Image (tube, rainbow, N blue to C red):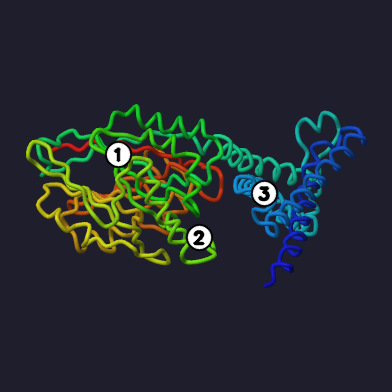
Amino acid sequence: MNKLLVIPILAIILIIVDLYAHSAIKIFFKNLSPRFLRIFAVGFWLVSLLSILGLFVYHFTGTTLLNFHQRSILMAFLFISYFSKGIIMMITFMGGIIEGMQNLFFNKKAVVSSENKKTGSEMTRGEFIKKAAVATAALPFTTLSFGVVNGVHNYRIVFKKIKLPHLPDSFHGIRIGQISDVHSGSFFDRKSVLGGIELLSQQKTDLIFFTGDLVNNETKEVNNYIDIFKKVKAPLGVFSTLGNHDYGNYRAWPSGKEKAQNLSDMHHAHKLLGWNLLNNENHIVEMGGEKLAILGVENWGTGRFPKYGKLGEAYAGAEDAAVKLLLSHDPSHWDAQVRPEFKDIDIMFAGHTHGFQFGIETANFRWSPSQYMYKQWADLYKKANQYLYVNRGFGFLGFPGRIGIEPEITIFELVKA
């Protein structure tokens, strides 16, 4: 359907949602003065009309009027607002149907509270349903808003101890830090990002891994954060790989030459950061005459994501290393190729999923919509003697918030079993 037709239809739908929401919310103010009710109505519909105008601006102006961050905040506001209003509409609509059936068959027209009995006033069933709808919608509205304001930079340390039976004594107790999915083009608070990097630096790691997606669409997004991410350092080195967003595949380029230059700039950005970018290659760390191999492949994933990775090339020359650690952005690589074909790769470090930036995690329960797309979507997995760790991501993409799935810095300790 033509976009010129889709947007007006969507605007009509949003106005209908607003009508339901306005009808429900104004119940809370019905005992106030008519003047206040008029002010409330004008304010409510002014915000609604500005929201619909914002929708038009978002779709028809691109980044000519609003920059990336402004567009993200606008869409977050629209999503939170109309998601909450949609709950009000759904409950009010269904409640109206139930109320109509009860009135028709049982002649029950009012719900009377104990307080109303004392005053002699009564709350109609419809008013009760509308108040219940608003109260129900208040929870997701508050939660989503908090996720935008606080969740995106609420960095947490996740500690994992992994036992490897053939880990050389020289590497016993080695500490490895991992961050992933920075998506620097989404950031709007340098101070908070710096706080996350300083938190990583405080962990005193021996190695640090970055497992892809430094940017959203193009390399220049990281330019304003080079000075911050240069602070990511470790005695034995920082090693990185590319994610699906690092190739510039998600924007239209005037020419193939400019796209190729963007990728070249990405490689240069890793050099500026002091990170060792592993593009289908490996690096051998030697201690006490013993070897640990760090393998890194370009993006390789199942489904619609491109397969640039060549694990055979990355593996070549690492055969004799006692322990092999693989950096590969997409966790689907593990089941699809790593485990079936390279059974001596001890641990694969991945990211990509972000844990959907939404979910529930407790000591005994973990859920996210991400699990319906990825078999391994967050935390540590083990099959036979091989491990996979999926980092929940340092940054964010799309929705500028995180609900229940916090941005993560992972610290591993490898010990000899």
**At x 40% / y 45%, what residue is drawn?**
392
**At x 11% / y 47%, what residue is drawn?**
322
- Spatial CA span between label 3 and label 2: 19 Å
Q: Position of residue 59 (x, y in %)?
A: 68, 59
Q: Position of residue 28 (x, y in %)?
A: 79, 37
Question: In the current view of this chain or complex, which residue is farthest to the top?
Answer: 202
Q: What residue is disc 3 on?
A: 66
Marker disc for residue 289 = none
Does residue 295 sit above or below 401 in this rendering?
Answer: below
What amino acid is found at the position of numbered circle 2 in the picture?
Answer: Tyr
The residue lying toward the viewer, choosing from 307 and 338, is: 307
Quadrant containing the N terminus in the rendered view: bottom right
Mark 3–mark 1 contact, CB under 8 Å? no
The residue lying toward the viewer, choosing from 18 and 168, is: 168
What amino acid is found at the position of numbered circle 3 in the picture?
Answer: Leu
Question: In the current view of this chain or complex, which residue is farthest to the bottom?
Answer: 1
Marker disc for residue 208 = 1
Helix or strand or loop: what does disc 1 sit on? strand
**At x 71% / y 43%, what residue is drawn?**
134
Marker disc for residue 250 = 2
